[in-house]
Amino acid sequence: MFHSQSRYFSIEVFCAIIIGAIALNSCSNRPSPINDALAQHHIQAMEDFNIAFLPGANNDSLLSADGWSRADAGRLVTKAFEVPRFQHAPEITVNLSLKSTGDPWDKSGAVLLLQDDWAKHIEQDSRAWPGIEPNASNGFTPALELLRFITPFGVGHYSDTERSDEYRPVYIPKWEQQVSWQNDISHLWSAMEDSITLAVYIDTWSAEGHELDLNITFKGQSARVPPPPQMQHLTLVNTTKFHANQSPFDGFATNPLNLDFQLPESAENAVLHYIPTGHGGHSEGDEFVPCRHIISLNNDTIAQFTPWRDDCASFRRFNPSSGVWTERTYWRGDSIDERIASSDYSRSGWCPGSDVPAMKFNLGKLEAGTHQLTIDVPDAQRYTDAAMNFWNVAAYLTWQRPEEL
């Protein structure tokens, strides 16, 4: 008898809980948090997705049947996605795989978060370089980079050709068929509310372009007491040309970039995340010329360094269509001609086929209010039709609230 009453009571309680949960959920448009602390959720954003330069077919702001909007003749694509909710900040990873579908060149690219009306702000901005920094008067926020990458020379499409086999060095057993990158973006959970506008950009001028697979993975963290702190964020600057109304940024060649920003609250353990890559054709362009960066906050220098990658030869297996030359060297007392590929040469903060992780500078405690960030690249060169010099620089701030420590 006691068994039977207990069983019926449990069923009634269970039904009441379910009905209450349904009623509570109906009062909100937001999905309920995922209760399983270790639950995983994937945003499968792209599968075999082609990004190419097609001026005749990809009109700006055209929404295709796949749900992606195209801009800049197809080089920038955007789409909104729902974001799962968690009781506590999850681990977040962005994963991207890429192969060429005919583009033989190395090109800069990025996976981004954009505000919904990002393009409208840039179209209405009359400045020489619109859209590179926040605008408090109209609420504009620059693009926030989740992953910066550089496409290799023709990986996949040119990996099985007779020419690439002829150029393959003896130390490479085979050309790779694709390149993959992964980046932990857990510290940007505060940038993801109910939904996000995800964007992918490749600076391609090829009608064939590249094929991409892109997903973002959310993984709940094990319960802890106290729970892991929530990181806050603020996008500061992005000089990359993502929109047809923008121009490659060569402003560093004439003046430092001074950026005033408002910190909405006191910050603990503040970190500046900084992503710089230099570009410019030919041997004298900023791609191949080391340029010192000086970063200051409120007139105090916080970092001086030169973005430079001298390990580009390690990416040779991803670059089957790279041009190859010979250079004279000496080995065992003999003068010999040794092959070297364009993809082997050192560059300003990147290599063909590499990602570009953000540099991190610890700032400690910052007070709420106005601050000034200064970025100086005194050796940067002007943009010309021959050299096409420009610097793609992005920066954002993360911090913890004092009460959450």
Image: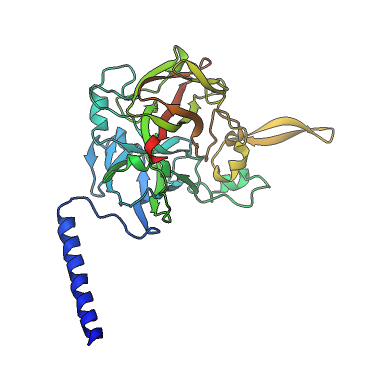
Q: Which residue is the extreme one toward the right?
A: 333
Q: Can residue 306 be seen in this view?
A: yes
**Quadrant placement of the C terminus:** top left
Residue lying furthest top: 254
**Drawn side of residue 7 relative to residue 384, left or right:** left
Horizontal side, residue 223 vs residue 25: left or right: right
In which quadrant will I find the N terminus?
bottom left
Residue 201, x across and y down, in percent: 37, 37
Count of residue discs: 0
x, y percent for residue 90: 39, 50
The answer to whether residue 170 is left or right of residue 295 is right
> Where is residue 384 drawn, in percent x and y?
44, 17
Please determine whether, in this image, residue 14 is positioned above or below residue 128: below
- Colour setup of the view: rainbow
Q: Residue extending furthest front?
A: 2
Please determine whether, in this image, residue 400 is positioned above or below residue 317. Answer: above
* Res 294 visible: no
In this view of the protein, which residue sits in the foreground, 104 or 304?
304
Q: Residue furthest bottom?
A: 1
| x, y percent for residue 309 | 58, 32
312 and 321: which is toward the camera: 312
Q: Residue at x 28, y 47 (%)?
A: 81
Q: Name the residue located 54 percent from the left edge and 49 percent from the top edge.
A: 161
- 198 or 332, nearer to the observer: 198
**Camera-side residue: 102 or 113?**
113
Residue depicted at 27% across the width and 32% down the height: 118
